[in-house]
Amino acid sequence: MVIAGLTGGIASGKSTVSAFLEDAGAVIVDADKIARNVVRKGQPAWREIVGAFGRTVLLPDGEINRILLGEIIFNDPVQKRILNRIVHPGVIAETATRLAEIEKNQPDAVVILDVPLLIESGMDSGLSDIIVVYVPEPVQIQRLMTRDTLTQAQALARIRSQMPIEEKKKRATIVIDNSGSREATRNISLTVYQRLKKKIAQQGPS
């Protein structure tokens, strides 16, 4: 089994690349999906979030209002750290469980660990390959404005609230430039998958 981390800046097209890699044959472990399960109603993290932020962050059905919670932590580093301390341990534990299952049942798999905050959370530790999806900042701004109906200033604020994409590129072993056509990105993603698949062949029989 080969595990590669996948990350990128907001509106860089990470989800698109993840889908292309899955189409090529990779097994995707999506940290966002895991996080949603970790904070479901009644889970330990759900109770901690309600305790820290109050019941105003709940939807009528009792689930976490992720949009509202995101707005609360967006401009408040202290609140963001509190939320991360609550959610990240559960995500890391569930991710480890999922990876162990894949290693047992699909030992020859190319596994893509799809994590928006891969580097910031420390989940890149021990990974031999880190894939960063990149677009230049002007493209990032335009895509974010279109996708989320934001002003240029709002889009820029969201981009600047994250680790700079140039810093992520420095940590990458593979950079996928997603500023071109969709087909170009698909072809690059396929090449990356084939490169990772070769590593499994080089490891020898499982």
Image: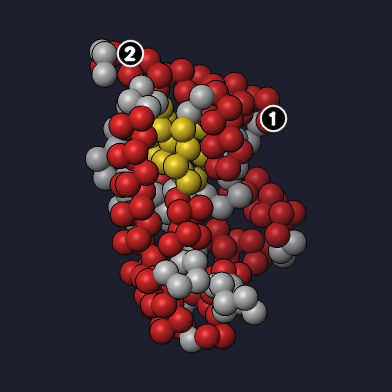
Rounded to the nearest angstrom, the CA distance separating label 1 from label 2 is: 31 Å
Is residue 138 something that shows in the picture? Answer: no
At 60% from the left and 61% from the top, the residue drawn is: 156
Mark 1 highlights which residue?
Answer: 181
Q: Alpha-carbon neighbours of circle 1 within 10 Å: few (<14), some, or many (≥20)?
A: few
* Secondary structure type for disc 1: loop
Left or right placement of residue 178 versus residue 119 in this view: right
Residue 93, labelled with which disc?
A: none
Residue 201, labelled with which disc?
A: 2
Image x and y of residue 180, in percent: 66, 31
Image x and y of residue 166, in percent: 44, 46
Kindly indicate the quadrant of the structure image that contains residue 43: bottom left
At 71% from the left and 63% from the top, the residue drawn is: 150
Residue kind at label 2, given as amino acid type: Ala
Residue nearer the viewer, 197 or 174: 197
Q: Alpha-carbon neighbours of circle 2 within 10 Å: few (<14), some, or many (≥20)?
A: few
* Secondary structure type for disc 2: helix
Image x and y of residue 27, in percent: 46, 33
Residue nearer the viewer, 173 or 47: 47
Residue kind at label 1, given as amino acid type: Ser
Task: Say which quadrant the N terminus sits in.
Answer: top left
Q: How many tags in the picture?
A: 2
Kindly indicate the quadrant of the structure image that contains residue 190: top right
